[in-house]
Image: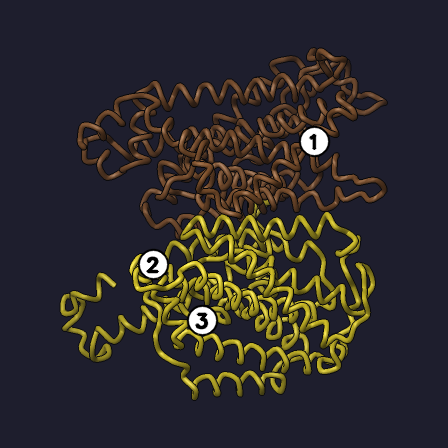
Amino acid sequence: MSHLAHSDLTDGPVDAAPQTAATADGGFAGWSPKRIALALICGLVVVWLIIKAVDDPRRFAVVTLNGTTLAALFFVVASGFTLIFGLMRVVNMAHGSLYLLGGYLALEMQDAWFKEESSGLGLSLSGSDDTTYSLLAWILPLILATAIIGVLGVLLQQVFLRWNQGQDLRQALITIALSVIFADQMLAAFGGISRDIKTPTAWPESVLLPGDVRFGFFRGVVVLGAALLIAAGLWFLMRRTRFGKIVRAGVDDRDMVSALGINVQLVFAGAFLIGALLAGFGGVLGGTMISLAPGQDTSFLLNSLIVVIIGGMGSLGGAAIGALALGLVDAYADVYLVFGDTDLTNYSILLTFALLVGVLAVRPLGLFGRPA
Amino acid sequence: MNPVVSQRGVSWPLLAGVVVLAGLAPLVFSDFFVSVILTKALWLGVAAASLIFLSAYGGMVSLAQVGIYGVAGMTFANLVAADGGNPAEWNPWIAALVALAVAVAVGLGFGAIAARSEGIYFLMITLAFSVLVFYFFSQVTQLSGFGGVNNLDLPSLVGNPSLDPLPLYYTTLVVAALVFVVLKYVSRTPFGLGLQGLRDEPARMRALGFNVTRHRMLAFALAALIAGIAGLLSVWYNRRITPGSINLAQTIDILIIAVVGGLYRLEGAWVGALTYALLDNYSREYTPTVGNVLGPERFNTLIGVVFLIIVIVSPGGLVGLWERGRERVRRRGPPPGTVGAGPEASPAAGNV
């Protein structure tokens, strides 16, 4: 027994694999009517999508790419959320605020440092179109804003969440209070108008994909690439480093880890740093890809919540799958909910809800969730 | 760690005293105060009571209450004559009953999903529900109109609140008192006691043959009924409903009211609501302006800070603070006359 537990800690990917397999087959014989109904619905959705894809493959490709890139952004933000929860059981309701603040900080830096350096006198007749941005004008704010949010996250954790570990409701309430204050202060400091961060002028507007499909360069290449890099980086960090090993052990049994002489407080701070960095980084990506406005914090908190509720709290693989499901459902529902003359795209949020309910009906803890 | 939930029944003399005092309030206060502070505090309190009921007796902190009251309000708004939305011009009383039925049905549905999870998962799932309801109504303008649903036709009982606020005030007062009594009563029925058992020992209750999920779901439906009542009172009070009035900010406001009042006492709902309504109206006059950071415009910062302080200092809210203070005084024994006996004499007082 103890040998088994030991091998769990030292070996890399051993603990996740059997669980995935168990969810995948699940045993056909024991399927309840509920599962069969859900499988039928999923089947119908797939058939519907195939019909749509055959109908207009190019449009289908663009919509799918839209969903995938949205999912990439959701994953970046939600992975930080799930990481913090997995290790510390802290539901960081201020995660959306960190996201939005990260975006705003980058925007302010870009405006303050890189706007004047641009072509001529900065007095253009046609608005900001003449302003050019170098690569540095995007990268530097990205790095700085991300770093600031990371430090801020650790500060918040040390001041507000360190002394009340284990009181998950109280911690959630504290982070809710923080999010209220943050939202109001950001409204005061950055205003209520929707703005966005500019991409470097040298980057192409769009790329041409095989099959004559045009897709936005930033969305398709930068966001997707960044998300893939982050996923790989997190995988490496969690599976191949000592830090990740401690974090995974901490998820399973925090008290045992600290009894083994590991400085759990330091690990907690580290996890919070990474979680906040991801929120800040996501904010800069999102601020460039979508926009920054009051309310985006709520929206990304909700997205993160749904992603981790679907995927299972604390599971990075779950976050990836949850993000993909949410992003694709969002994208397809926005476009394909038109049946003849009736346009039901207004009701697209119901599909998100259905996704959530469908997953929870079968797996109350999410796809990869484990009991606390 | 958390304050213990009271098992006592309704203290009838106290309740009667409070209701009579509240009933006499219009003699003392202006119409403005009665309407903007008292009526509002009463219906906000009903909404917070539905949250506190679930949290105190069921151990479920639900953030879906605003979503459910939004469903009730929107249903009512779309069934009676109104500007905007999809008015069906029904009799307001029938519309109110149907709205409550819809709220309970939605509550049962939400409950069926959320009741299977516990603790912080429950909080997150219900938060997602509430925000989804908000997004639903802000997207579906057929139901919510472009500028909300306005000028609702109200039941004859409450008349026209903007001309004479008293009928609505007394209606709200009676409803709030009834809600309090009913919830207190339910908490002492076998159903309520079972619910408290589930809160403390779900595994043991399951072993005793309780259907844990169904029990929780029914409690959630009861809370949905209360939330639906709050939704009706809120649309009667405002005579309109917009998606913006059921957004995350409102969800959090109700949570703040419940926490500031005290998550472990039903009374706390109205204590918190009154505090909130007073702060909402009068803090703006007294808040000093500190650059962009603080000032009359920054009410949310103020309420956020109050909320933060309450959560940090007293998990039992204002009611918890009051009880802790009373406890401390009682343990100190005889009142301050005996100065010499001082602090060392009561070792227990330190660790309250």
Answer left or right for A240 relative to A222: left
Q: Nearer the viewer, residue A224 or A4?
A: A4
* Residue for point 55% across, 47% down: A357
| Chain B on-screen colour | yellow
To the question of a shared chain for discs 1 and 3, the answer is no
Label 1 to label 2, Cα distance in Å? 43 Å
Q: Is residue B122 above or below residue B331?
A: above
Mark 2, residue position? B202
Residue A68's image quarter? top right
Q: Nearer the viewer, residue A266 or B213?
A: B213
Q: Which chain is brown?
A: A
Q: Which comes before the other along the chain, label 3 or label 2?
A: 2
Mark 3, residue position? B266
Q: Position of residue B178 (x, y in %)?
A: 53, 80
Mark 1, residue position? A49
Label 3 to label 2, Cα distance in Å? 22 Å
User: What secondary structure is found at the residue carrying circle 3?
Assistant: loop
Pointer 1 local density, CA inside 10 Å: few below 14, some 14–19, many at least 20: some
